Image (spheres, rainbow, N blue to C red):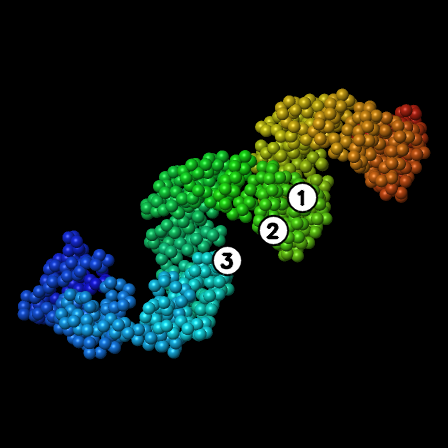
């Protein structure tokens, strides 16, 4: 107990006398209860040199706010009087003497003081009219600081009579005179006074205060001279100097208003004016540097701290650690921590938190163990920091050990620690432990509910997250914007569109910031397939940051609308929104979706301009975009320069090679990937299986199948569909069927792959059976499914089934697709209905090379050579032709016996139409000459071929020799066939 404004503390009085050897026997009563403050000296018996016994046998220590009087009774055992006793007390303050004299009733001392006062009142401050506390003295000596109270019970009786002779006006005049002198001193030298006018946090705080004498002045007091305000208005603003307290108040106010740059500017101005900040101000300035992430300003403040010797202060050192951590200088933070002479639990906690937030959770745990080894008891802040480290590392066992420490220290009731425990268990995948902590909490706040909801989302339990959100509202807890973000993510994870719309309505009613919630709503609607709602939310956002644009562009990409995504990116550039790496990744994915190669190249150039070309994710997206567009050379150039190749980059490059017909290169790259110990994912296996299918590499495909099983991807629907496709294209329809039948869930892709596989293996009937079975199970066919079914009808000439499938195509809206149209033309032509083939062709809105080739091939099959030549002339008028066009044309000439026309077009292919001659063209010409009986010319064509003839070429010549019974040429053809295919039975 310290000195009170009402007198000396009993313990201080007792202990001082005991040290001096004065005998004490004290018993203290505070409202009837023994006071423990006197337990050390109660009953002590010792004697001083005078043989004095001191028995303060009754003291009553009253609360000054209850305005109870202090009464001290003391008596002596010898002749020493009361005044002599009180004079022996150790009173080291002048005003304390007066206080003790007042309490003890020393009339002689008080009479002397009052006599001094009346002899020269100018030496005393008169506080009677501006007392700020009831117990404050009425008069105070200017030099000795002695104090006097008018209403003191120990005052001499003549004091009141003497004071009564002094009129109130005279007293007031004296007070006014003193104030006028002080105001004159202020205007004479303002540099000696602190100016508090503009930063007062309390209206009773003085406007000006003397730097040394601590004298105070108020502008709006009655005792203030009238001329003061005019003088103040006339003086320049820079005449006054703010006190350290004023600067501290302004800097603190800027921090509360989140004006961190302004706080730093005030600190700089404070230094320019020569005002030295105290420790509290430096802590506030460091917080401003931390929040604004101003490293250079932080370093200047650090230099100031060192210059003034504050670097050893624990609180300042902790703030420095946090500032350097937030500015990305973890090494400097660690150096400050290691240099601290004394590290308390706050410093340890700050450093642990710095490592955690910098992604070094293991180092944070090591530091926590080191703190334990030094015998420091962790507090709630330390637990929060280390639990976050456990969450970042998903270290469940370590988290449970710390949880036990939390229980032992009694910090489990701390709601912040409880929230961190929930977060730790959820991030570690133990949602049951998180629920147990949540249910065991006695007090919940909004963060508790939000953390639990986020935990459910993290563990893939979106439905429970929505249930918890409803329970939160039922218990009267209002969600904030973070809670809405969490529950919207839950709706997105389980595609709960209706729940998302209901929460959207609540967001509108709550008035949350649309900039934050809007991005989550766009993501929700886009992923749930409601791109119109996403676009509506985006268009109604008043402020759209780069995250908003990225979310909307990504939504278009996920919905398969790459063109709209690219258009939105252009609008984003027009509105001068600076793209970030995520923007480029989304836009490059859009380029891959619509195969916009030129746009991808332009974005690539933009990436280089912004120095983002070193970003691994952007480079991976470039590889993916170029590969999807079929430009594997450009993709390879980007891929070969990647400093770090992740599985996404490898998979994109492998898939690009496979889709572009470079199957062997894809398999080589897969082997290199495995040598570099990169674990393949689903996309990698899909690319490799496509490569095996294009190369008919059945054995390699089987080995890939084994690796898929080892990696646990055998149940992935996309991988299973590729396995079916690979086995079917490699001719192993039995293995394809086995994989298909083993699938737990079959989507339209897997059904389509199996149907196409049956068609490729010449089993059209089974393909159509599977097509009908698929529809009976409620699976809606897509474009690939219809193509497979129509090709199956064409392969077995199933005209009626083809017509039935044609009607389904029309109902589903695919008839306008050129690929479907061409397939229908081919199906009707192969089924013998060239009229229906022509009808479908004429209905097509836009004819391309594929549709023209299909019609031309139909004429060829039906031997309609003249119609084929007429169709070819139409193709020449405005359609791009290719090698397939000439195969159909030459075949038509062959079936129609148009030798001269066929020979003319064959010789015109390269010089006129710039079409390279292939084996198929040569085979058609051999067949053309053979059907016409010109066997010698047919053999000469084979001899003059620029390519090595294959079995079909020699078989065409052998068939013609059999027809025209030319044994000599037939024998030569048969020998060539046996050399190329010894097991061929047709020879």
Q: Which mark is residue 328?
A: 3
Q: How many marks?
A: 3
Quarter of the image for residue 249 reads bottom left
Q: Residues within 10 Å of mark 3 (few under 14, many from 20)?
A: some
- The location of residue 661, given as percent across then percent down, is 73, 40
Q: Earlier in the sequence, mark 2 or mark 3?
A: 3
Circle 1 sits in a helix, a strand or a loop, which is it? helix
Residue linked to disc 1: 564
Q: Residues within 10 Å of mark 2 (few under 14, many from 20)?
A: some
- The location of residue 56, given as percent across then percent down, is 12, 62
Q: Left or right: where does residue 647 sit relative to residue 142?
A: right
User: Which of 719 and 354 lies nearest the eye of the viewer?
Assistant: 354
Circle 3 sits in a helix, a strand or a loop, which is it? loop
Give how far apart the Cα atoms at labels 3 and 1 are.
Answer: 38 Å
User: Which of 172 and 332 lies nearest the eye of the viewer?
Assistant: 172
The answer to whether mark 2 and mark 3 are in CB contact below 8 A is no
Residue pictured at 83% horizontal, 26% vertical: 834
Residue pictured at 80% horizontal, 29% vertical: 840
Residue linked to disc 2: 581
Number of the front mark, 2 or 1: 1
Give how far apart the Cα atoms at labels 2 and 3 are.
Answer: 20 Å
């Amino acid at each position: 107990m310290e000195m009170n404004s009402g007198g000396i503390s009993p313990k201080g009085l007792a202990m001082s006398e005991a040290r001096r050897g004065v005998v004490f026997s004290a018993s203290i009563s505070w409202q009837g209860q023994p006071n423990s403050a006197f337990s050390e000296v109660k009953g002590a018996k010792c004697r001083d040199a005078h043989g004095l016994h001191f028995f303060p046998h009754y003291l009553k220590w009253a609360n000054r706010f209850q305005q109870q009087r202090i009464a001290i009774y003391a008596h002596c055992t010898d002749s020493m009087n009361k005044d002599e006793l009180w004079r022996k007390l150790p009173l080291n303050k002048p005003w304390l003497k007066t206080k003790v004299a007042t309490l003890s009733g020393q009339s002689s001392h008080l009479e002397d003081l009052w006599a001094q006062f009346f002899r020269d009142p100018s030496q005393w401050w008169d506080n009677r009219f501006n007392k700020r506390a009831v117990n404050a003295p009425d008069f105070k000596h200017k030099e000795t600081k002695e104090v006097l109270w008018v209403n003191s019970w120990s005052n001499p009786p003549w004091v009141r009579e003497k004071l009564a002779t002094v009129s109130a006006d005279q007293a007031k005049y004296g007070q006014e005179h003193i104030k006028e002198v002080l105001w004159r001193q202020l205007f004479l030298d303002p540099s000696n006074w602190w100016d508090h006018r503009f930063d007062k946090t309390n209206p009773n705080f003085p406007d000006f205060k003397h730097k040394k004498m601590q004298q105070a002045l108020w502008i709006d007091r009655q005792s203030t001279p009238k001329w003061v305000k005019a003088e103040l208005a006339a003086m320049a603003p820079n005449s006054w100097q703010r006190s350290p307290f004023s600067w501290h108040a302004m800097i603190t106010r800027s921090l509360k208003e989140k004006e961190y740059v302004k706080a730093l500017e005030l600190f700089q101005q404070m230094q320019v004016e020569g005002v030295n900040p105290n420790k509290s101000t430096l802590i506030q300035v460091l917080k401003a540097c931390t929040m604004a992430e101003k490293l250079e300003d932080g370093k200047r403040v650090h230099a100031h701290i060192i210059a003034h010797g504050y670097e050893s202060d624990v609180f300042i050192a902790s703030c420095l650690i946090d500032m350097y951590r937030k500015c990305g200088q973890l090494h400097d933070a660690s150096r400050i921590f290691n240099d601290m002479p004394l590290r308390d639990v706050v410093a340890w906690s700050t450093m642990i938190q710095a490592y955690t937030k910098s992604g070094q959770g293991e180092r944070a745990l090591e530091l926590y163990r080191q703190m334990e080894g030094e015998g420091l008891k962790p507090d709630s802040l330390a637990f929060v920091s280390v639990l976050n480290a456990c969450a970042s590392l998903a270290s469940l066992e370590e988290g449970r050990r710390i949880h036990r420490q939390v229980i032992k220290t009694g910090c489990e009731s701390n709601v912040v620690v409880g929230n961190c425990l929930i977060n730790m268990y959820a991030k570690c995948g133990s949602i049951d432990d998180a629920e147990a902590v949540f249910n065991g909490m006695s007090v919940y706040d909004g963060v508790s509910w939000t953390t639990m909801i986020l935990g459910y989302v993290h563990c893939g339990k979106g439905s429970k997250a929505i249930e918890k959100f409803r329970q939160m509202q039922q218990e009267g807890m209002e969600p904030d914007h973070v809670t809405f973000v969490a529950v919207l993510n839950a709706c997105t994870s389980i595609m709960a569109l209706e729940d998302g719309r209901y929460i959207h309505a609540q967001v509108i009613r709550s008035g949350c910031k649309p900039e934050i919630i809007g991005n989550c709503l766009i993501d929700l609607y886009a992923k749930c397939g409601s791109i119109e709602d996403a676009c509506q939310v985006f268009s109604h956002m008043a402020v759209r940051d780069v995250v908003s644009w990225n979310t909307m562009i990504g939504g278009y990409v996920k919905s398969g609308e790459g063109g709209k995504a690219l258009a939105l990116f252009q609008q984003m550039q027009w509105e001068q929104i600076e793209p970030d790496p995520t923007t480029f990744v989304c836009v490059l994915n859009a380029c891959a979706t619509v195969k916009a190669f030129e746009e991808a190249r332009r974005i690539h150039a933009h990436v280089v301009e912004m120095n983002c070309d070193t970003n691994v994710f952007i480079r991976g997206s470039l590889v993916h975009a170029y590969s999807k567009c079929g430009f594997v050379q450009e993709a390879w150039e980007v891929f070969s320069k990647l400093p770090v190749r992740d599985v996404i980059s490898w998979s994109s490059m492998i898939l690009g090679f496979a889709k572009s017909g470079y199957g062997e290169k894809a398999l080589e790259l897969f082997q290199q990937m495995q040598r570099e110990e990169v674990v393949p994912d689903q996309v990698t296996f899909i690319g490799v299986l496509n490569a095996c299918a294009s190369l008919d590499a059945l054995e390699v495909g089987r080995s890939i199948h084994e690796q898929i099983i080892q990696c646990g991807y055998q149940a992935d629907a996309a991988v299973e569909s590729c396995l079916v496709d690979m086995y079917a294209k490699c001719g192993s329809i039995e293995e394809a069927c086995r994989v298909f039948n083993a699938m737990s869930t079959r989507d339209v892709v897997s059904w389509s792959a199996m149907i196409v596989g049956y068609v490729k293996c010449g089993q059209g009937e089974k393909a159509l059976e599977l097509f009908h079975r698929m529809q009976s199970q409620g699976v809606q066919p897509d474009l690939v499914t219809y193509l497979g079914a129509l090709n199956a009808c064409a392969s077995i000439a199933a005209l009626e089934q083809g017509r039935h499938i044609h009607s389904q195509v029309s109902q589903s809206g695919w008839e306008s697709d050129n690929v479907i149209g061409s397939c229908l033309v081919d199906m009707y032509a192969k089924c013998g209905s060239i009229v229906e083939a022509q009808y479908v062709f004429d209905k097509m809105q836009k004819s391309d090379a594929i549709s023209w080739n299909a019609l031309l091939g139909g004429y060829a099959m039906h031997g309609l050579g003249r119609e084929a030549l007429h169709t070819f002339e139409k193709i020449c008028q405005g359609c791009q032709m290719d090698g397939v066009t000439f195969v159909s044309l030459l075949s038509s000439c062959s079936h129609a016996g148009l030798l001269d026309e066929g020979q003319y077009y064959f010789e015109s292919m390269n010089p006129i139409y710039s079409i390279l001659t292939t084996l198929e063209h040569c085979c058609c010409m051999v067949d053309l000459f053979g059907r016409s009986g010109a066997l010698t010319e047919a053999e000469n064509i084979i001899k003059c071929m620029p390519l090595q003839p294959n079995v079909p070429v020699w078989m065409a010549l052998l068939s013609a020799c059999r027809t025209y019974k030319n044994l000599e040429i037939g024998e030569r053809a048969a020998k060539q066939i046996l050399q190329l295919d010894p097991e061929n039975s047709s020879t």
